[in-house]
Amino acid sequence: MTLYETLKNNLFIMAGPCVIESKDICFEIAERAKAVAEQYGFTYIFKASFDKANRTAASSFRGTGLENGLEILKAVKDKFNVPIVTDIHESCQAEPAGKVCDIIQIPAFLCRQTDLLTAAAKTKKIVNIKKAQFLSGLDMKYPLEKVYSADNNQVMLTERGTMFGYGNLVVDFRSLIDMQQFNVPVIMDLTHSTQKPGALDGKSGGNPEYAPYLAAAASACGIRGFFAETHPEPAKALSDGANMVSLNDFPKLLENIKKHSI
């Protein structure tokens, strides 16, 4: 069974730090998150970004860069025998990322960028498209078709909240139901959906305490794929710490998903 077939038929969680801070941090998170995921019957996929090109402020930490970042992701993959997902922001990053990663992720702000979508599709890896904060679930038909047009039918869609005024997101759970009609795995992003973009004077804030409730509601909608950024010390994380789930709370999060899964 391919990874895509596994993800279409089983509970899975994509989890890791927002950005690659160091190999040691990635190893710690991968080891602990994989063990918890296996305990609760989830397929585990390690997530981290080699570059966060969409940080609020120019002074914010962006990551280790493409070459070093992919080396660390490959080290995680080899040591822990887990699939890898990372995001790309430019078409030229698709090919090198595809040599290491099992899933290429398209950031929400870029989900209508045709060249980026087709470059990701041409890697023949699974393409996870995050729904833009300004699009409906039904609008995701068009990014989906762009990947299909490049002869790749391994696509997933991720809900990550919709803009509700300035600096606030809400989740319209109708989008989860609408996107499921495309017959692809649909993922609930439990941490970015609690984000408050740009709310902390040049960086994003958030309310991660809402994540378990979003997980339960998504499970009740039939969602079996989940995304969560996690860190041993979110307050010290170099990106998105304000909306991360603490690694210590990760077991409770997965337990709650399993409890409400239908």
Image (cartoon, rainbow, N blue to C red):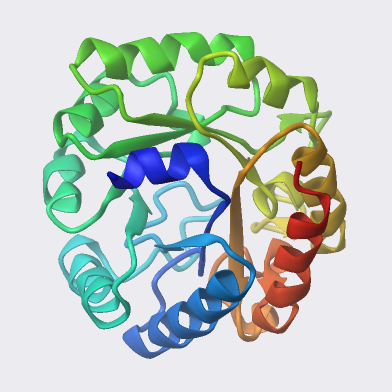
On the question of residue 234 being in view, the answer is yes
Q: Residue at x 35, y 40 (%)?
A: 4
- The answer to whether residue 253 is above or below residue 148 is below
Left or right, 215 with respect to 178, comes to: right
In front here: 219 or 107?
219
Q: Residue at x 87, y 51 (%)?
A: 213
Q: Residue at x 46, y 56 (%)?
A: 58
Left or right, 63 with respect to 170, comes to: left
The single residue placed furthest to the front in the displayed view is: 1
Left or right, 74 with respect to 95, comes to: right
- The answer to whether residue 221 is above or below residue 99 is above
- The answer to whether residue 151 is above or below residue 52 is above
Q: Position of residue 146 (x, y in %)?
A: 32, 13
Please count the marks in the image: 0
In front here: 136 or 242?
136
Q: Position of residue 134 (x, y in %)?
A: 65, 21
In front here: 249 or 39?
39
Q: Quadrant of residue 191?
A: bottom right
Which quadrant is the N terminus positioned in? top left
On the question of residue 135 being in view, the answer is no
Q: Quadrant of residue 26?
A: bottom left
In front here: 5 or 153?
5
Q: Position of residue 204 (x, y in %)?
A: 68, 56
Which quadrant is the C terminus positioned in? top right
Q: Position of residue 32 (x, y in %)?
A: 53, 84
- The answer to whether residue 100 is above or below residue 159 is below
